[in-house]
Image (cartoon, rainbow, N blue to C red):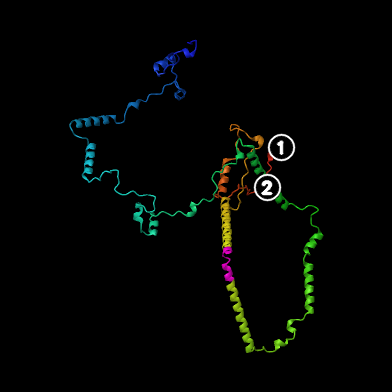
């Protein structure tokens, strides 16, 4: 039923009603048709033949005996006699009440509170002073955890954040930076391949070795050595050996003895030299007193250089720790960058296509964090060579 006119002129009772959830009202609105749920229709049996009734389903095993026991217990209970189970239970309770029962917990312990994680715990007081070997053999002493297990093998995070250019809707500059990075990696691979190809390739026809170049390479160094030997022989022939020379007069005559005057002069000269050396050392020390400021400045500069070298060594050590180590015979190789070209960018998550493999990414991450060594897929190697047998049927077809 529809009403004409403005809604603002209508009353609230004519526009709204309160749904009280009345079942009669719901049945009336649904015209008395209450349909079961679809899941209930699926679970109902499809066969029109009713299931056979189990004749013994209403029976209970030993029901007659159990009824007799129940009637006997009710009769004894009316006479004030408890059953045997009740009498045994009461006797057990009386026996327990006869013993001294511990006081009920009041909620406040009588001992002081203590930290169970501290080194000096009340629970370990019985182990204080015991032999460590005895405690270790009786499994009462914890095995000390090695310090190397507390240190992470690498400082790299388990999950690395992808560059901004790898997003589904990156900015132009971020995407260009990622493309440049991928381009540099590909150029490096090409240069390595070219270098390896150049080393393994044969020389060109113009650069190929000839018989003359081979002979010259074999004779290289032989002519120079022969010329040097001839010059040595000529020089040796012109000079006489020292053993054949006549001894000089000084060698033949006896050594002259020094006079007392000569010894006195040498002693005075030596004393004068020591005196001059001491005076020079004293002047040098006196001059160093005036150089205290420059010496301090020099020491400060040396300390700064030492601290700088130490800082560089620390930075280098940290940089080495962040790099993957060589744990096996293979060296770690960075995986290829998962990038999309400018015309492949989706722009929305709905049209985004997956790039790369999560399994490979996690496997490479374990290698990069020095948890496992670098590996490569095993190559199939045939143990026995293949044998080709020409069947009789095939030969007939071929003919």
Residue at 73% from the left image edge and 83% from the top image edge: 243
Residue 177 showing in the rendered view:
yes
Residue at 63% from the left image edge and 85% from the top image edge: 265
Q: Quadrant of the C terminus?
A: top right
Residue at 22% from the left image edge and 32% from the top image edge: 73
Residue at 50% from the left image edge and 52% from the top image edge: 151
Where on the picture, by quarter, is residue 105?
top left
Label 2: which secondary element: helix
Above or below: residue 141 compared with residue 101: below
Q: Nearer the viewer, residue 396 or 379?
A: 379
Where on the picture, by quarter, is residue 166?
top right
Left or right for 202, reference 258? right
Q: Nearer the viewer, residue 70 or 267?
A: 267
Most extreme residue toward the right is 212
Q: Is the residue marked by circle 2 packed among few (<14), some (14-19), or many (20+) residues within 10 Å?
A: few
Kindly identify which numbered label has been placed on residue 188.
2
Left or right for 225, reference 139? right
**Predominant secondary structure in magenta?**
helix
Above or below: residue 16 compared with residue 114: above
Percent coordinates x, y for residue 8 in the rendering: 48, 14
Most extreme residue toward the left is 79
Percent coordinates x, y for residue 268 in the rendering: 61, 83
Q: Is the residue marked by circle 1 packed among few (<14), some (14-19), or many (20+) residues within 10 Å?
A: few
Does the stretch in magenta take in 276? Answer: no
Left or right for 28, reference 334? left
Q: List the residue tagged with mark 1.
A: 397
Boundaries of the magenta span: 284-295
Percent coordinates x, y for residue 194 in the rendering: 71, 49
Above or below: residue 371 compared with residue 306: above
């Amino acid at each position: 039923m529809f009403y004409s006119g403005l809604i603002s002129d209508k009353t609230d009772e004519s526009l709204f009603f309160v749904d009280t959830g009345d079942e009669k009202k719901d049945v009336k609105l649904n015209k008395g048709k209450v349909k079961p749920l679809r899941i209930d229709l699926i679970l109902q049996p499809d066969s029109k033949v009713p299931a056979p009734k189990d004749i013994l389903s209403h029976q209970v095993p030993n029901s007659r005996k159990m009824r007799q026991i129940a009637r006997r217990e009710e009769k004894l209970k009316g006479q004030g006699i408890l059953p045997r189970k009740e009498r045994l239970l009461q006797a057990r309770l009386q026996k327990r009440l006869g013993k001294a029962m511990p006081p009920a917990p009041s909620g406040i312990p009588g001992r002081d509170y203590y930290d169970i994680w501290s080194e000096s715990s009340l629970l370990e007081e019985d182990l204080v002073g015991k032999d460590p070997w005895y405690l270790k053999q009786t499994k009462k002493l914890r095995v000390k955890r090695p310090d190397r297990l507390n240190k992470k093998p690498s400082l790299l995070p388990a999950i690395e954040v992808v560059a901004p250019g790898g997003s589904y809707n990156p900015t132009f500059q971020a995407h260009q930076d990622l493309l440049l990075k991928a381009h540099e990696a590909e150029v490096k691979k090409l240069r390595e391949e070219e270098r390896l190809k150049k080393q393994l390739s044969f020389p060109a026809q113009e650069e190929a070795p000839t018989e003359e170049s081979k002979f010259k390479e074999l004779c290289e160094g032989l002519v120079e050595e022969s010329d040097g030997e001839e010059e040595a022989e000529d020089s040796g022939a012109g000079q006489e050996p020292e053993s054949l020379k006549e001894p000089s007069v000084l060698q033949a005559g006896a050594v002259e003895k020094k006079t007392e005057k000569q010894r006195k002069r040498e002693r005075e000269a030596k004393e004068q030299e020591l005196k001059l050396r001491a005076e020079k050392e004293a002047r040098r020390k006196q001059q160093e007193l005036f150089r205290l400021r420059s010496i301090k400045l020099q020491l400060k500069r040396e300390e700064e250089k030492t601290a700088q070298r130490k800082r560089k060594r620390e930075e280098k050590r940290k940089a080495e720790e962040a790099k993957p180590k060589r744990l096996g015979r293979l060296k770690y190789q960075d995986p290829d960058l998962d990038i999309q070209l400018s015309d492949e960018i989706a722009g929305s998550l709905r049209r985004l296509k997956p790039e790369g493999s999560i399994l490979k990414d996690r496997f490479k991450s374990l290698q990069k964090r020095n948890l496992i060594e670098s590996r490569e897929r095993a190559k199939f190697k045939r143990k026995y060579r293949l044998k080709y047998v020409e069947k009789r049927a095939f030969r007939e077809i071929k003919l």
